[in-house]
Image (tube, grey):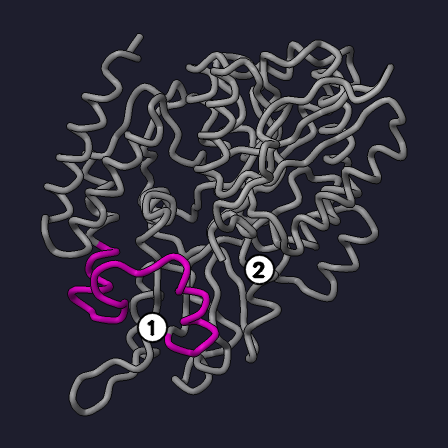
Amino acid sequence: MRRRSFIGGSAAVAGGLVAAPATAQGTVEVSFFYPVAVGGPITKIIDGLAADFEKEHAGIKVKPIYAGTYQETIVKALTAHKSGTPPVTSVLLSTDMFTLIDEDAIVPFDDLAKGATDAAWIKSFYPAFMFNSQTGGKTWGIPFQRSTVVLYWNKELFKEAGLDPEKPPATWAEQAVMAEKLTKRDAAGNTSQWGIQVPSSGFPYWLFQGFTTQNGVELMNQAGDTTYYDKPEVAQALQYWVDLSRKQKVHPPSIVEWGTTPKDFFERKTAMMWTTTGNLTNVRNNAKFDFGVAMLPAGKRRGSPTGGGNFYVFKKSTPQQRDAALAFIKWITTPERAAQWGIDTGYVAVRPDAWDTPVMKKYVEGFPAAAVARDQLPHAVAELSTHENQRVTKALNDGLQAALTGAKTPEQAMKDAQAEATRILRPYKK
């Protein structure tokens, strides 16, 4: 399961990747790109929500279009935008905000909002999720399926290793010591059980932001035109990650795959893992042992980046379509629906009042782990997002992998990554 859970393959509805006209006299159609492959449980939930919305809004038809991964969905959305037929709305990464603004593809929600009620709605979401939703005094995205990185641990393996099964590591030092006790090797030195796994494929920058935040440093500025990859605290954070693997040998060597990390956890090949809270439902359904979920351990402080997807509204839609899209987005993010979406998927319910609903209170009472990511939000920072975001992020990912494989020292890897990011961002400097 990928970081943004339920993001699957590349299949898409044939011929559906265009904005549709009104379907009947007086009916407005809202084409809605959603980042998932066709089929599977998530499409049933989205289809059900669209149908329920239509029952309450007779003049609007919502047409979900399943467009593949997040990466595939933004490519398709921008291609459709350039051809003049974009979707009316789409769920895309919160980190796509600058790219969408630079392409002049979206409209800010402030321009769609009508009156004090809509303004209050925009302010109803957790501030941590708005870091990647607002820039330049405008709100460009509305949080929907959002996440943080959390630590999962196998309580049975903790007990076997003589550790308190109810006490996860709270600091970097504890994490390293516990990982040592949880690593199992045979007489020949072959490892059958790792103490910890932190994925370094797929979204290495995102997991790495856990380490950098905990070391008291952020990777970019709010304007999205400057990165800080070469700060000493960044290299120190990377050194800690590298040392878990290459020095202490409690973490698998080289690159750890994003998709196989939960599977390794289920198969007891690792006792602890860092991954998205979006994997919570997956872990609950597939772990055949007692497990725990905790905030990430603290270095100088606690911390995690936020992650996941926002709703955006596309500029080339009609005023009627935009109004209809706003009605749908407001409807799907009500406290009750935000709560149910979090329960069904494992994402963090995106607004505080969702946690006060009876259904969420009952869920958390029976499954306290569901509240860990929420409780981590006061320590959370914005996910890495800049102009030319994919290229700037790739520069960091390449540096991380060079250090983790031993091709470069952490310090040199981060200096090189910063030089590349600076070159890419030069045209955007004010």
Task: Determine which quarter of the picture holds residue 419.
Answer: top left
Q: Which dot marks residue 218?
A: none
- Local packing at callout 2 (Cα closer than 10 Å; few below 14, some 14-19, many 20+) is many
Task: Work out whether mark 1 precedes mark 2 in sequence or the reverse, and give the earlier one.
Answer: 1
The furthest residue to the bottom = 187
Where does the image place residue 82, in percent across and percent down from the top left? 47, 15
- Local packing at callout 1 (Cα closer than 10 Å; few below 14, some 14-19, many 20+) is many
Front-lying residue, 365 or 342: 342
Label 2 belongs to which residue? 280
Tell me the residue at 35%/64% (across/down).
197
Where does the image place residue 204, in percent across and percent down from the top left? 32, 48
Observer able to see residue 300: no
Asked if 310 appears above or below 249 in the picture, the reply is above
Q: Is residue 134 left or right of residue 418?
A: right
- Give the magenta part as a residue range: 240-269
Q: Is residue 200 left or right of residue 13?
A: left
Quadrant location of the C terminus?
Answer: top left
Which of the two marks, 1 or 2, is nearer to us in this view?
Answer: 2
Tell me the residue at 76%/20% (across/down).
324
Asked if 81 appears above or below 397 in the picture, the reply is above
Q: Looking at numbered disc 2 in the image, what kind of residue is underneath it?
A: Leu
Question: Quick one: SS at disc 1?
Answer: strand
Label 1 belongs to which residue? 195
Observer able to see residue 291: yes
Front-lying residue, 365 or 91: 91
Q: Looking at numbered disc 1 in the image, what kind of residue is underneath it?
A: Gly
Tell me the residue at 48%/45% (across/down).
10
Where does the image place residue 18, in percent across and percent down from the top left? 59, 24
Tell me the residue at 21%/61% (across/down).
254
> Cα distance, mark 1 to mark 2?
20 Å
Residue 266 included in the magenta stretch of the image: yes
